[in-house]
Amino acid sequence: MLNEDLNALGFGKNEAIVYKALFELGRVKVQAIIKHTHLHPNLVYPALDALVEKRLISKIIRKGVGVFEANDPIALVRYIEEKKELANSIAEKLKKQQTERSREIVVYEGVEGVRRTREQALAELKAGDFFYVLGASHDTSTELEAYWKKFNTRMIKNGIDYKLLFDKEAKEIILNDRSLNLNIHARKLPFGVDIPMFVAFYKDTLNITVGTHDLITFSIRNQAAVNSFKKYFEYFWNNQVLPLKLS
């Protein structure tokens, strides 16, 4: 059982056997360890070298002969703590690399490309997460219009912080058609947006869709870009938006 516990801590099979044997034997020469463990010398010597390197046992040379002894068991705790510190250090370096990694960009074409990015968002988001659309268009293909209603309903039902800023020309009937609640899930920008483009973003993903019929969507994984768009979005949502009016 003790051997299995040592294995769980990262000890090799032979290291665990030799380490345990030294507590049972005390200070001994290699031959005594071989006899006690029934391991081949070619297995015992590497195990001893590894344990010495980990500072879990001590090696003393007496008259040219090596004698081995287990260190205080607290050395095992220190060894694991050092590994934990090293793991934390590596994790921080990896996190920094992840933050500084190059942008990951994927290009999707057509209506199916838009759907694919939206379905991916639904798969990644959970209740309380945000999904925002800046420059939501009131003029999209019939195929997408049918999809928006289903997508919006699923987002709201899942408890996503779901908000859309429409361009200035959007009318309230558009919200009704797309199952959106005025001022809760949708508002409009105070200025006209005469660019055939809308931007959706969540977590570390930014999707920029260009065009009205031959759509192209650029999907970018970049946290800094999302953070910038989120600040821009929230500024207009909280301070500069105009309510949609019946017309």
Image (cartoon, rainbow, N blue to C red):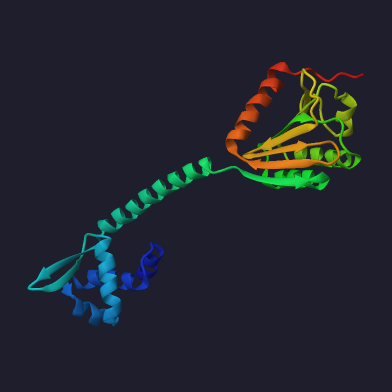
Indicate left or right for 232 with 26 as reference: right
Q: Nearer the viewer, residue 141 or 129?
A: 141
Residue 91's x, y, as percent? 44, 47
Which residue appears at 47% of the width and 47% of the height? 94
Q: Hey, which quadrant is residue 220 in on the image?
A: top right
Indicate left or right for 127 with 183 as reference: left
Name the quadrant of the C terminus.
Answer: top right
Q: Hey, which quadrant is residue 103 in on the image?
A: top right
Vertical placement of 44 versus 195: above or below? Answer: below
Which residue appears at 61% of the width and 29% of the height? 228
Which residue appears at 58% of the width and 34% of the height? 224
Q: Looking at this view, name the residue that lies furthest to the left.
A: 63
Q: Hey, which quadrant is residue 141 in on the image?
A: top right
Residue 146 visible, this angle = yes
Which residue appears at 72% of the width and 46% of the height? 107
Q: Nearer the viewer, residue 23 or 226?
A: 226
Q: Nearer the viewer, residue 70 or 233?
A: 233
Residue 27 visible, this angle = no
Vertical placement of 120 versus 224: above or below? Answer: below
Residue 92's x, y, as percent? 44, 44
Residue 160's x, y, as percent? 71, 37
Residue 158's x, y, as percent? 73, 41
Query: What is the tally of numbered marks visible in this picture?
Result: 0
Name the quadrant of the N terminus.
Answer: bottom left
